[in-house]
Image (cartoon, coloured by chain):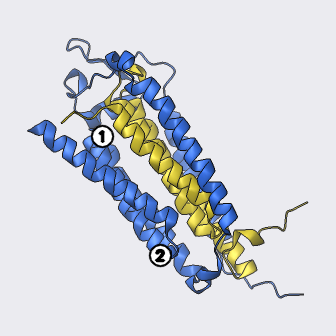
Amino acid sequence: MSSITFFHYFAVACFLFVTGLFCILSKRNVIAVLLGVELVLNATNLNLVALGRFPGWQPQLAHEGQVLALFVIVLAATEAALALGIALCFYSLHRAPDLDEAQDLKG
Amino acid sequence: MENLLEVLLFYLFAGVACGGALGVALGRDIVRCLLSLVLTLGAVGGLFFTAGAALVGVIQILLYLGGTVVVLIFGVMLTSPHVQPQLETGLKEKVLAATVCMALFGILMGTGYWIFAHPLAESGSQVISAPAGGLSETEAVAASLLGLRVLPSEETRISKASPGFHCLLAFEVVSIHLLVVLVAAAYFARARRPRLPE
């Protein structure tokens, strides 16, 4: 059985990214779109951490990849909190978490 | 034997992560989507452990599974799930989104194979298994956070060699940002009277 290379991690991260993108594009519920954003951020994190494990490609990313992953995790937490605040505000105005109704700012 | 265990753990976590991601993308019920996301986040945390990043894995489980997911659960609870069945996109949009996503997946995997897994590029894929300079992995990450570069050689354990990556100020900015964003979220989510229809 062959050992794990960076390409294995990269493939998993690509799959997570693409499913997250599909989730963002194909859902109408605000919360479901947020779930897709979380998937995309996790794919990014997986790539950053795996680059630290196999640093032959980017030697300067040996441990900085993990530091960047920590920043991404914190920013994902803030993004979820703020987006949910906006979603609740939107829900109290429209009585449904439906993105297609978000047309108040349409020119 | 250790290598076999690592490979098996990687495939287990990768399979759970990909299955959970499919569950998030294809599920119709928002609660099931959320539970699939919990599965995916846990499996990604496991992948961090197999990649040797124990600190990031622990923080992933603490912050994501303990914090972000709870916030999302409250979001689902507060935006009344009984309207969910009407919130379906049309078949046309789904086919379009699937086409775009599969094309992007093909492009990414093709590029990644050419760069990372091509036989010509094998020379760059050596693994750092032992932490550098006699430090533990977490200490090395902390040194990186302070802008210090950990060198593999024993005599120069830590040297200040990465002037472009000094992120202590950024760390403080992110902390203040977290506080400000939480206050803003509490302001946005405050109870208010619904607007009456005209």
**As drawn, which residue projects farthest toward the top?**
B155
The image quarter in which residue B118 lies: top left
Residue displayed at 48% across by 36% down: B109
Q: Where does residue B99 sit, x and y in percent of width and height?
A: 61, 51
Q: Badge 2 is on which residue? A: B31
Can residue B182 be seen in this snapshot?
Answer: no
Report the side of A24 relative to B165 (left or right): right
Q: Chain of mark 1?
A: B
Q: Looking at the picture, does residue B142 appear above or below residue B196?
A: above
Front one among B92 and B83: B92
Say which amino acid is labelled 2.
Val
Residue displayed at 19% across by 24% down: B134
Residue displayed at 14% across by 44% down: B5
Which chain is assigned yellow? A
* SS state under label 1: loop
* SS state under label 2: helix
Say which amino acid is labelled 1.
Ala
Q: Looking at the picture, does residue B28 appear above or below residue A42?
A: below
Front one among B15 and B51: B15
Q: In 3D space, how far apart are the residues under numbered discs 2 and 1 (Cα atoms)?
A: 30 Å
Q: Chain of mark 2?
A: B
Front one among B95 and B65: B95
Q: Colour of chain B?
A: blue
**Neighbourhood count class around disc 1 (C-alpha, 10 Å): few under 14, some 14–19, many 20 upward:** many
Q: Badge 1 is on which residue? A: B53
Can residue B60 be seen in this snapshot?
Answer: yes
